[in-house]
Image (cartoon, rainbow, N blue to C red):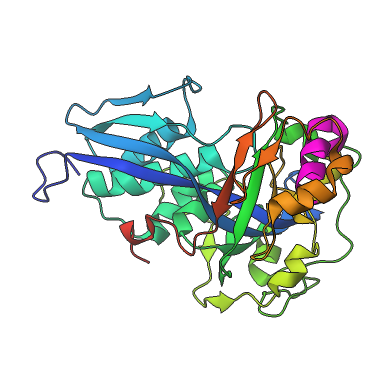
Amino acid sequence: MTPSSSATPLKALYDVPAPAKLNLFLHVVGKRPDGYHLLQSLFVLIDWADTLHFERRDDGALHRHDRGDALPEDDLCLRAARALRQASGCAFGADIHIEKRLPSGAGMGGGSSDAASTLLALNRLWGLNWSRERLLPIALKLGADVPFFVGGRNAFVEGIGEVLTPIEVPALRLAVVKPAASIGTKEIFSSPLLQRSESVAIVAGFPAANDGRSKELLETESQSNEVNSCGGRTDTLKSSIRRDHQTLEIPVQQLYEGWGRNDLQPPAESVSHEVSKALEWLQARYENSRMTGSGSAVFAIVRPSLNALQIAAEKRDAVSGLESNLKATPEGEFEKLPEGWVGRMCRSLSVHPLRGWAED
């Protein structure tokens, strides 16, 4: 497509959200011959988000403008824009403005979400109107979490992140804390403390088969991890989304009580005592806590009847040394955190705000 095409693209898109995700559980169930770990996880979108703004350029140039702390020079947003332009042959460019609100190094998918929102926004801004299926190969080339955000629904995720089963998740209120420490993903996956789960997610409604791994996943194990960066046909690894939306059948009460686990949490706690401290603080207030992704952010599912202040008062000894620096309002929001920590009360999203920006 060129600027002279008959379709008239938009000139700009402002206030484009890029929401974070949390892993309600994350099980490591194997490892491929090429070194990639095989996972099963429940990804849930939340209302903590970055905000992006896009302005079309007719000269084909791509520029990113950081409204806040400087990001890496060649981040996923620019890589996403270049990949879409290359795949489509589009001659347009864009000025991409990023208001970074999500913490980095958190395991919340902030960079991947920014890349996904860039693909969806430029697909619209440049007048491409590609389907979701056509965008997914580009998304997977950018990173294992990017297809989830392009898919736009909470999902049971398998493989290295490319096999998605959309799931309807009950509305959840979640307390999220990101300590100052950031942990490298490679450091976590190479840790001797990382253990493969002995059991897989045998859950009613989940596509657990063949020792918990779906047919698509078993096929993936024998395939290369190379993907056509132009989004064309490929005989190697592909991202897939099952069309049969299912209803999550894990009672929320089981999630409160610690159903499942994050197999990456023990290695993360061994690397950073701050992860352990943040988990303890949430556990004392909400009676559950877990790390998301490879960390270092942690979260708790907040029961509707839970009074955060009451539980904090009853269990303040459990977080000695942090109590004077941490305070929750009656609404559960954080007023003060240790230096370098960030946190907020979040709600789960049923669908991505940009879900309608690409057709299935």
Residue 291, position as x, y percentages in the image? 74, 46
Q: Is residue 297 left or right of residue 102?
A: right
Residue 152, position as x, y percentages in the image? 46, 59
Residue 8, position as x, y percentages in the image? 11, 48
Q: Residue at x 71, y 49 (%)?
A: 309
Q: How many marks?
A: 0
Looking at the image, which is closer to me, 334 or 291? 334
Q: Is residue 224 visible?
A: no
In magenta segment, residue 280: yes
Q: Is residue 141 visible?
A: yes
Q: Quadrant of residue 118?
A: top left
Q: Residue at x 63, y 67 (%)?
A: 216
Q: Quadrant of residue 109?
A: top right
Q: Magenta stretch: give its range.
A: 268-283
Q: Residue at x 77, y 47 (%)?
A: 312
Looking at the image, which is closer to me, 221 or 19? 19
Quadrant of the image containing the C terminus: bottom left
Which secondary structure is most common in the magenta stretch? helix
In magenta segment, residue 75: no
Q: Is residue 213 left or right of residue 267?
A: left
Residue 294, position as x, y percentages in the image? 72, 42
The vertical placement of 35 against 158, above or below, is above
Q: Quadrant of residue 248?
A: bottom right
Quadrant of the image containing the N terminus: top left
Q: Is residue 130 left or right of residue 318?
A: left
The vertical placement of 249 against 104, above or below, is below
